[in-house]
Image: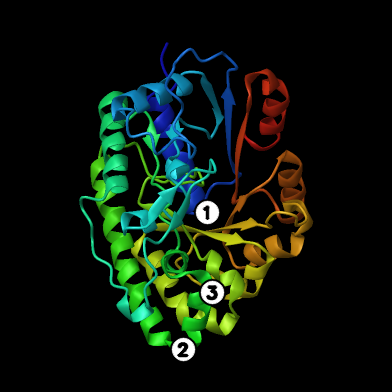
Amino acid sequence: MSIKFGKDDWDRIKETYDSWWNRTLERPAIKLTLQQEAPCTSSIPLLSQANCHRLDISPEDVVERINAHLEQQEYLGDAFPMVNFDVFGPGVLAAFLGATLDNSSGNVWFHPTEELELSEMHFEYQPDNLWFNRIKDIYGAGIRKWKGNVLMGMPDLGGIMDIVATLRGSENLLYDLYDEPEEVKRVSREIQELWLRYYKELNEILQPVNPGYSDWSGLYCSEPSYVVQCDFSYMISPDMFREFVADDLTQLCTLLPHTLYHLDGKGELPHLPQIAAIRQLDAIQWCPGDGAPRTMEWPEVYRQIRQAGKNIHVLGARKDFDSIAKDIGAKGLYLNLSAPASAKDEYVSFLNKYLP
């Protein structure tokens, strides 16, 4: 059995997403990945946050298990075979810089190994870091196995200030914004420089064989791209966002050819005007958060993003997408769907409403 995808498919994917990023695609981009429900006979678990610590499993075995999973998939619409490396947790750059990776709960969290004052915090590139090299080794095994027919995404490196908050502690960092603003800016600059270095080095392993670029959003891009974010901004004012976040964010959006912003929770909505005003930012993903009304119930947010001329990653179900598309139009929207193969007919019916 083999993965049902080939060069002509990749050429089509590149053309579609290039048009989407450049806002010339006259329809939405919709991924539909169908998964066969065949039982797995392998004793090796599929790579996940719950088992990413299993260094006893060789990179080659990790890739073989992923390959068996991909062989059971069918790619419809704008979908493609991909390995999402968010399995090492959100903000894994903290682990690259020495934080402890803890997945004892089944989900990955990061903890600093010691509590330091802000003035004592200095970060350097760590080429021998365990987790950095584990990801590199799996990338290498994937390149050898798939030879460019499966896209391996970038791990979730995290937002710059989110990484600072992980290493310093969110409460401490909130006080630091008042007490030591210049030190906060120094540390965030150090981390941003390292973020860019790790991003570059990981891509140097993947390219030119990897058939494109992606991240935890699942969006394809033929050029370097990323989901940028600042979940920490939920707790700060627009003035503080302007002082501590906006410049670094704009720099990332300038240095990377394409970027998508992850707007997470209603506490970040006061920052939307500043975010939407970043000319180099291509798209925004709105995530209402746990316990909040579903995405279709925030039409004013989507209208604001649309009026700023940004594309939109819709998080939600088909019903949410239909409602948003009806209100602001489907062009420039992106939706990532997955479903069991047994539900193919109803999902294809949805696809046919939007895709030729």
Tell me, for residue 347, which label it has, or none. none
Q: Residue 299's spot in the image, x, y percent?
A: 75, 60
Q: Of label 3 and label 2, which has the lower sequence position?
A: 3
Q: Mark 1 points at which residue?
A: 23
Q: Position of residue 356 (x, y in %)?
A: 61, 32
Among numbered discs 1 and 2, the one appearing first in the sequence:
1
Q: Which of marks 1 and 2 is in front?
A: 2
* Neighbourhood count class around disc 2 (C-alpha, 10 Å): few under 14, some 14–19, many 20 upward: few
Q: Where is residue 46 in the image (x, y as percent from the top left)?
A: 46, 27
Q: Is residue 331 left or right of residue 349?
A: left
> Of residues 209 and 134, which is closer to you in this image?
134
Q: What residue type is labelled 3?
A: Glu
Query: Closer to the observer: label 1 or label 3?
Result: 3
Q: What element carries label 1?
A: loop
To which quarter of the image does residue 220 belong?
top left
Judge by depth and name the residue closer to the eye, 101 or 349.
Answer: 101
- Marker disc for residue 171: 3
Please name the amino acid that badge 2 sits on: Asp
Q: Position of residue 346 (x, y in %)?
A: 73, 25
Instruction: Estimate how packed mark 3 is, as few (under 14), some (14 to 19) or many (20 or more) residues with alpha carbons within 10 Å.
Output: few
Label ID, residue 179: 2
> Image point 71% across, 35% down: which residue?
353
Determine the residue located farthest toward the front in the rendered image.
114
Residue 157 to residue 183: above or below? above
Disc 1 from disc 2: Cα separation: 44 Å
* Amino acid type, residue under disc 1 in the picture: Arg
Per the model, the C-alpha gap separating discs 3 and 2 is 13 Å
Number of residues whose C-alpha sits closer than 10 Å to that of mark 1, classed few (under 14), some (14–19) or many (20 or more): some
Q: Do the residues labelled 1 and 2 touch (CB within 8 Å)?
A: no
